[in-house]
């Protein structure tokens, strides 16, 4: 059996990309782990995984990395995993459009640009290529305070749907990987700075301190109940390497729950559940009375 060649974006230490790289390697694949900062891939180097520099927001970096892989693999690539991403949490009424644009530049546009850069190599895959886009369960429901992130993942999911149809004639499969709760360091990739703080005049000012604490990269309350990242990666890779991988790959904590709720619950009922879950009375205080 020919060794599969896999390239993964966003493989910084402690993240989902690095866990995927290790799982693919253990499954017998040759893996190219990439990240913008090579000093943050010590986990990859310790595992003997080949590392390359790739800034997914830079067309020059994408072109350079694709050329390097072409030379290393004799012009072919079997699997491309578009995993790089970041977060931005903020009520919609307070979102800074420039920060939202930065989010899309990492979470959405690279699905197009990175895929375009490596497509010539994927077309040469002996048994057909595979493109995997790591979206999220947030692509299918409106998690409060995550509107920008939800929108970026929904855009990524619909790009995946279109890519799957367009790439099929060229023997390239496309998987939308709907990731649920996983213990990772995504909080370290949050957009931080003055614009990441809820303004004092926000409609959610009553919950401002709690929201800002949550938004500033602190460990989520449910962190310990989330699926360990290496367990998640092993599950994902075993399904991706099947002859016919699922077009929608749900994996991680809460995925079954979200899948059921978004299909069976009326939207209004789910809205009420989310407001209770996020303790909206504490977040809005008496603001609804003040604005009337």
Image: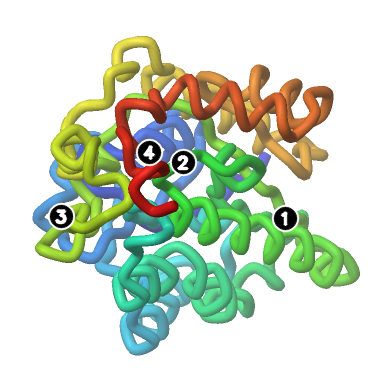
In three-dimensional space, the C-alpha distance between marks 3 and 2, rounded to whole angstroms, equals: 19 Å
Q: What residue sits right under mark 3 in the picture? A: 200
Q: What residue sits right under mark 4 in the picture? A: 16
Whichever of callouts 4 and 2 sits on the residue coming sooner in the sequence is 4
- Nearest to the observer: residue 224 or residue 81: 224
For the question of whether residue 89 can be seen, the reply is no
Whichever of callouts 3 and 4 sits on the residue coming sooner in the sequence is 4
Whichever of callouts 4 and 1 sits on the residue coming sooner in the sequence is 4
Whichever of callouts 2 and 1 sits on the residue coming sooner in the sequence is 2
Residue 78: x and y in percent read 62, 57
Residue at position x 15%, y 60% in the image? 38
In three-dimensional space, the C-alpha distance between marks 4 and 1, rounded to whole angstroms, equals: 19 Å
Mark 2 nearby-residue class (10 Å; few <14, some 14–19, many ≥20)? some
Q: What residue sits right under mark 2 in the picture? A: 144
**Secondary-structure class at tag 2:** loop
Q: What residue sits right under mark 1 in the picture? A: 174
Instruction: Select label 2 or label 1 by which is in front.
Output: 2
In three-dimensional space, the C-alpha distance between marks 4 and 2, rounded to whole angstroms, equals: 23 Å
Whichever of callouts 1 and 3 sits on the residue coming sooner in the sequence is 1
Left or right: where 3 falls relative to 147: right
Residue at position x 61%, y 39% in the image? 178
**Secondary-structure class at tag 3:** loop
Mark 3 nearby-residue class (10 Å; few <14, some 14–19, many ≥20)? few
CB atoms at circles 3 and 4 under 8 Å apart?
no
For the question of whether residue 290 can be seen, the reply is yes
């Amino acid at each position: 059996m020919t060794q599969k060649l896999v390239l993964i974006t966003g493989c910084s230490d402690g993240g989902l990309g690095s866990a995927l790289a290790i799982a693919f390697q253990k499954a017998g694949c040759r893996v190219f782990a990439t990240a913008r900062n090579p000093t943050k891939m010590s986990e990859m180097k310790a595992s003997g995984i080949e590392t390359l520099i790739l800034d997914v927001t830079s067309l020059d970096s994408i072109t350079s990395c694709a050329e390097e892989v072409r030379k290393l693999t004799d012009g072919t690539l079997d699997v491309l995993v578009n995993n790089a991403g970041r977060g931005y949490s903020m009520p919609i009424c307070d979102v800074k459009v420039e920060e939202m644009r930065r989010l899309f530049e990492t979470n959405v546009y690279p699905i197009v640009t990175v895929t375009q850069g490596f497509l010539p190599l994927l077309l040469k895959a002996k048994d057909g290529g595979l493109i995997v886009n790591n979206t999220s369960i947030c692509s299918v429901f409106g998690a409060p305070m995550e509107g920008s992130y939800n929108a970026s993942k929904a855009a990524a999911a619909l790009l995946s749907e279109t890519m799957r149809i367009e790439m099929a004639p060229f023997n390239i499969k496309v998987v939308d990987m709907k990731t649920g709760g996983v213990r990772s360091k995504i909080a370290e990739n949050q957009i931080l700075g003055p614009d990441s703080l809820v303004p004092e005049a926000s409609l959610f000012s009553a919950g401002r301190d709690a929201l800002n604490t949550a938004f500033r990269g602190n460990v989520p309350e449910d962190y310990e109940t989330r699926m360990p990242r290496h367990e998640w990666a092993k599950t994902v890779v075993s399904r991706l390497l099947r002859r016919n991988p699922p077009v929608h790959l749900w994996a991680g904590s809460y995925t079954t729950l979200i899948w059921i709720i978004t299909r069976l619950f009326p939207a209004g009922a789910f809205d009420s559940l989310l407001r209770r879950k996020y303790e909206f009375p504490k977040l809005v205080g008496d603001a609804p009375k003040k604005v009337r």
